[in-house]
Amino acid sequence: MAFLKLTTLVIKTLSKPLSKALKTRVTADPKMAQFVEAIGQKSHSFWSSITIRAAGHKGLRVKPLDEATALNQGADIMAEFFIFSVASGAMVLELVHSNSVKAHESKLKKEREAAEDDALRASLESIEERISQLERAQTDLLGALKESSAAARRDPDQEKKGETRSSFFRWGLGL
């Protein structure tokens, strides 16, 4: 980002001498000089009529500039337009770069969140599997307990042994 800012600053700085060179070159070429002179005349006419109307006058005609002044004013406008274009382009370049950096950061954040979601999902599946194993073990133990209880009911001698054992445990616990 610092490199981009430095580059745009250098380009903006170099655009001013380039605009002066452009101004000199435009005035030297006869076809371009006519075009730039017409721009100077239109600019003068536009701004003069706005000034006249702002002063409250209507219907006054604007006198055209002489060729040298119109050429100079048109060349100034071209030079300023060049500097403005360079500055605008640099600003758009910085904006595009900033947006691409934000998009990349957003993409990385989404990837991290997706990885975290996958890890949580895997952990949840593992926990659910463990719960189902414990439920099966509980069911097996309850079944075995019911079978031993049913067997003890069928065999009264076994029941007395169980009572003795449970009485012993009650005595040991102080119940």
Image: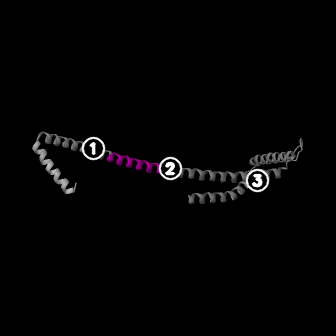
Say what amino acid the circle numbered 2 marks: Ser
Query: Quick check: is 124 in the magenta stretch?
Result: yes
Q: Secondary structure at mark 1?
A: helix
Q: Residue at x 14, y 40 (%)?
A: 153
Determine the residue located farthest toward the left in the rendered image: 157
Between residues 171 and 93, which one lies in front from this camera angle? 171
Report x, y in % for residue 155: 11, 41
Decide: marks 2, 3 in contact (CB < 8 A)?
Answer: no
Say what amino acid the circle numbered 1 marks: Glu
Which numbered disc flags the more N-terminal residue, 3 or 1? 3
Q: Secondary structure at mark 2?
A: helix
| Structural distance between the alpha carbons of marks 2 and 3 | 45 Å
| Structural distance between the alpha carbons of marks 1 and 2 | 43 Å
Please tell me how crowded label 1 is: few (under 14), some (14-19), or many (20+) other residues with Cα within 10 Å.
few
Q: Which stretch is magenta?
A: 106-127
Report x, y in % for residue 94: 60, 53
Image quadrant of residue 152? top left
Residue at label 3?
76
Which numbered disc flags the more N-terminal residue, 2 or 3? 3
Say what amino acid the circle numbered 3 marks: Asp
Q: What mark, if any, has residue 106 been given in the picture?
A: 2
Which numbered disc flags the more N-terminal residue, 1 or 2? 2
Residue at label 1?
135
Q: Residue at x 16, y 54 (%)?
A: 168
Decide: marks 1, 2 in contact (CB < 8 A)?
Answer: no
Quadrant for the C terminus in the image: bottom left
